[in-house]
Image (cartoon, rainbow, N blue to C red):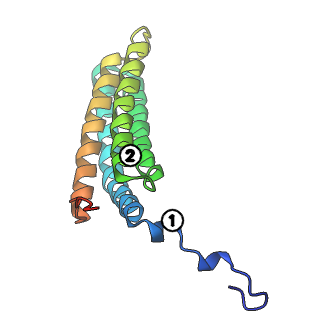
């Protein structure tokens, strides 16, 4: 309440994070996973791009860059989905995460399939860069998740 008018102001109302501890935890996990995954993911893209360029020239360089951008973008999209659904029921967050993962795999498959007909892009470099980057990113996310030491046991509601 403001002292001058006696009307409630926005500072008196609890925020969504204060009323939903699950959302706070999910957002903290997403931030930790992002911090843990960005550098290893970028190094994976760089390494794959350099190797592809060395082995196949300019098509490999383009393939590595395209594959890295797609994999990096899809990995960031997964963390965005995690943060944006944090206020929902925990089971919905899991459904959204699984749906996001399936959607990501479909998009990655479509990108590789559409690039097959292009001569100036080495499709194997795209596919391998995507694969390596997603695997490295996921392993780093798991490492970041485990370092937060957040309990992940859901106690059944007795009501």
Using the image as rendered, state which of residue 73 and residue 56 is in the foreground. Answer: 73
- As drawn, the label of residue 37 is none
> Can see residue 47?
no
Q: Position of residue 89 (x, y in %)?
A: 39, 53
Nearest the camera: 11 or 79? 11
Q: Secondary structure at mark 1?
A: helix
In the picture of the structure, the residue carrying the numbered disc 1 is: 16
Q: Quadrant of residue 131?
A: top left
Please tell me in which quadrant of the rendered image residue 59 appears: top left
Identify which residue is drawn at 37% across, 62% down.
Answer: 22
Could you tell me if the residues under marks 2 and 1 are in contact, i.e. CB atoms within 8 Å? no
Relative side of 103 to 145, left or right: right
x and y percentages locating residue 36 in the rendered image = 31, 56
Q: In the image, residue 50 lies at what x, y percent?
A: 32, 33
Q: Residue 26's quadrant in the figure?
A: bottom left
Q: Write the residue at 29% across / 44% down.
A: 137
Q: Is residue 14 left or right of residue 20?
A: right
Disc 2 is placed on an element classified as: helix
Crowding at mark 1 (Cα within 10 Å: few <14, some 14-19, many 20+): few
- Give the distance between the C-alpha atoms of the residues marked 2 and 1, in whole angstroms: 17 Å
Q: Which residue is mark 2?
A: 92
On the question of residue 105 being in view, the answer is yes
Q: Residue furthest front?
A: 159
Residue 122: where, in percent of width, then height?
Answer: 36, 17
In the image, 24 versus 139, the foreground residue is 24
For the C terminus, the image quarter is bottom left
Q: Residue at x 39, y 36 (%)?
A: 100
Quarter of the figure that contains the N terminus? bottom right
Q: Nearer the viewer, residue 136 or 141?
A: 141
């Amino acid at each position: 309440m403001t002292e001058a008018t006696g009307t409630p102001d926005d500072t008196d109302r609890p925020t969504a994070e204060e009323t939903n501890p699950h959302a706070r935890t999910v957002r903290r996990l997403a931030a930790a996973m992002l911090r843990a995954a960005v550098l290893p993911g970028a190094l994976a893209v760089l390494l794959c791009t350099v190797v592809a360029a060395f082995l196949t020239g300019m098509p490999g360089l383009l393939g590595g860059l395209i594959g890295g951008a797609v994999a990096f973008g899809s990995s960031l999209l997964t963390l965005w989905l995690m943060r944006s659904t944090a206020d929902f029921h925990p089971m919905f967050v899991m459904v959204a995460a699984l749906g996001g993962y399936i959607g990501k795999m479909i998009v990655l498959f479509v990108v590789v399939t559409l690039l097959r007909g292009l001569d100036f892009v080495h499709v194997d470099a795209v596919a391998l860069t995507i694969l390596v980057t997603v695997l490295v990113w996921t392993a780093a996310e798991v490492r970041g998740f485990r370092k937060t030491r957040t309990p992940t046991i859901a106690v059944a509601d007795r009501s």
